[in-house]
Amino acid sequence: MICVTPVTRDMIGIFLSAGILCGIMHIVAKDEADYSFVRVLLVAAVLFAGNLLLGAGLGLLSIPIMFVVTAWALQQFCYLGWGKAFLVATLYYVCQILLGVLITAIFQ
């Protein structure tokens, strides 16, 4: 059993999320997107903070709001078109759910 603090688990999650987001953008929009790791890491960190703050205040209502914010952030900062931004956001949130289940299983 691995014993880590919640902050460490969250930081690992942010780095893994950024890597997953880079991979998804590389597959979906290889020639269109700017998926440099530092840029995507900053986007993933801001999305994590937004999820945390909105989730605390709005609960489940924050899910569709953050989905649209994620697509907007990908369109704005990674230069994706709206269609590909929503496709990447959909795949990203599917991977986020799977990543959350995996991290919970490993660190519990």
Image (cartoon, rainbow, N blue to C red):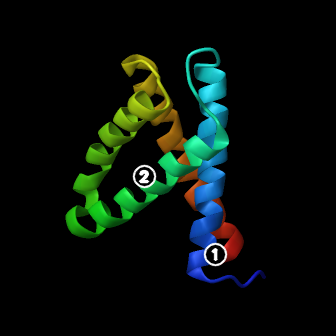
Is tag 1's residue or tag 2's residue first in the polypeptide sequence? 1
The crowding category of the residue bearing disc 2, from other C-alpha atoms within 10 Å (few below 14, some 14 to 19, many at least 20), is some
Q: Against 57, is 91 above or below?
A: above
Instruction: Name the residue located 48 percent from the left edge and 46 percent from the top edge.
Output: 43
What secondary structure is marked by label 2?
A: helix
Q: Which mark is residue 95?
A: none
Residue on which the image places disc 1: 8
Q: Position of residue 106 (x, y in %)?
A: 71, 69
Q: Against 8, is 16 above or below?
A: above
Residue 46's image quarter? bottom left
Is 53 or 34 nearer to us in this picture?
34
Q: Residue furthest right?
A: 1
Instruction: Name the residue located 58 percent from the left edge and 58 percent from the top edge.
Output: 14
Q: Against 74, is 60 above or below?
A: below
In the image, what residue type sits under mark 2? Leu
Residue on which the image places disc 2: 47
Q: Position of residue 39 (x, y in %)?
A: 56, 42
Q: Please state, as top left, top right, bottom left or bottom right, where the N terminus lies in the image.
A: bottom right
Q: Position of residue 38 (x, y in %)?
A: 62, 46
In the image, what residue type sits under mark 1? Thr
The crowding category of the residue bearing disc 1, from other C-alpha atoms within 10 Å (few below 14, some 14 to 19, many at least 20), is few
Is 56 or 37 nearer to us in this picture?
37
Q: Against 78, is 51 above or below?
A: below
